[in-house]
Amino acid sequence: MRGREFIAVAVWLESLDSEASQRSQTSRLYYAVYLEARAWCEDHLGYVRIRSAREHVNIPGLLRNVDAEVAASLVFMRDLRNTADYDMDLSPDTIGLQCLDAQRRAKRILDRLDELTIPGADA
């Protein structure tokens, strides 16, 4: 399964138009970009999976040497995902804004990963 398949789920969740769907959308968008970034690191950097939560730190660390902005956005999206999943005290408006931010960041990350063909390439 490819990470991008979670984008379709996020799009479907958008149609539900609720706080719960926005929280779930943010979570799915994070996993879409995380899985795509991990696959990119496997394909282009020879990354070997360790099958641990530590990978959520390792992948941005590897990407930092290739594209610092992608790495920083991936870290930020993980924070958004954690907030969406665990912080029930945020207002629905804040959750909505975070969801919009996650949508924009996910698109930029996926577009940039598509542009990168070799580590350090400046497309």
Image (cartoon, grey):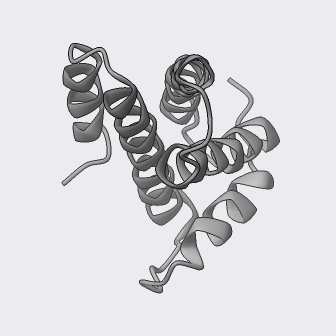
Give whichever of 3, 81 is nearer the camera: 81
Q: Position of residue 32 (x, y in %)?
A: 38, 43
- Tell me the quadrant of the picture where the C terminus can be found: top right
Image side of residue 51 versus residue 11, left or right: right
Left/right placement of residue 107 relative to residue 90 reads: left
Q: Residue at x 47, y 51 (%)?
A: 85
Q: In the rendered image of this protein, does residue 13 appear above or below residue 71? A: above
Residue at the spot 61% in from the left edge and 63% down from the top edge: 59
- In front: 107, or 12? 12
When asked about the image quadrant of residue 20, the answer is top left
For the N terminus, the image quarter is bottom left
In the image, 74: left or right of 29? right
Where 73 sits versus 2, above or below?
above
Which residue occupies the foreground of this view, 7 or 71?
A: 7
Q: Residue at x 41, y 57 (%)?
A: 39
Where is residue 55? Give x, y as percent.
56, 73
Task: Please state the total of marks drawn on the protein image.
Answer: 0
Question: Residue 121: where, in percent of width, then height?
Answer: 70, 37
